[in-house]
Amino acid sequence: MIQRKQSIFLLLAAIFSVLCLCMQVGTYTPDGMGVGSKMMNLWILNENGSTDMKVCPLFVLLLMSATISLLTIFQYKKRLFQSKLCVFNMLFIVGWYVVFAVFGYVLTPEQMTFHPELAAAFPAVTLVFIWMARRAILADERLVRAADRIR
């Protein structure tokens, strides 16, 4: 339910994931003269206007993360399952950063440098929100178990 604080954290995580999906996450600038390429989550927009779809795993990982965040909100009756989904979602975000580093720094075209944009920090914000949601979910579970012991 939305009135629980973990639901708000998960909703904010999904919003930041979708925002990152829509924004530019990096720029390839040439070492000399010329126009650079823009790296989005789904493609790289080259200087001549063509697109290269080799970075689509970034899009897939972030889309899965946003979907899992929204799905986790509605699993409020199964707190332990909700907690496991949060851990799984955090792994998707860490995987996004691994793929981002590979495409940004390891597979950079020759004579170009890579510069991350502000939107590349949004998955880290998402990771923090998911971590906070998981802590709140586990706190709720402890509270329910303590109430069961009292009865």
Image: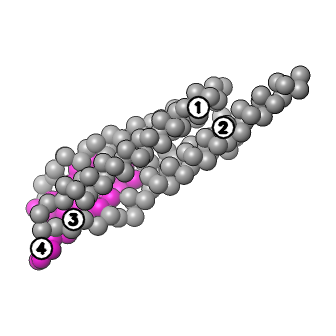
Q: Which residue is mark 2?
A: 137
In the drawing, does residue 25 fall left or right of residue 83?
left
Q: Are marks 4 and 3 in contact (CB under 8 Å)?
A: no
Where residue 150 sits in the image (x, y, percent)? 89, 26
Q: Which residue is mark 4?
A: 34
Q: CA distance from mark 1 to mark 3?
A: 39 Å
Q: Which residue is mark 3?
A: 28
Q: CA distance from mark 4 to mark 1?
A: 49 Å
Residue 43 colored in magenta in the image: yes
Please indicate, yes or no, whether residue 74 appears anywhere in the rendered image: no
Q: Which residue is mark 1?
A: 82
Q: Which residue is at 30% across, 55% downward?
A: 101
Lower position in the chain sequence, tag 3 or tag 2 = 3
Residue interval drawn in magenta: 20-48
Q: Is residue 144 above or below residue 55?
A: above
Nearer the observer, disc 4 or disc 3?
Answer: 3
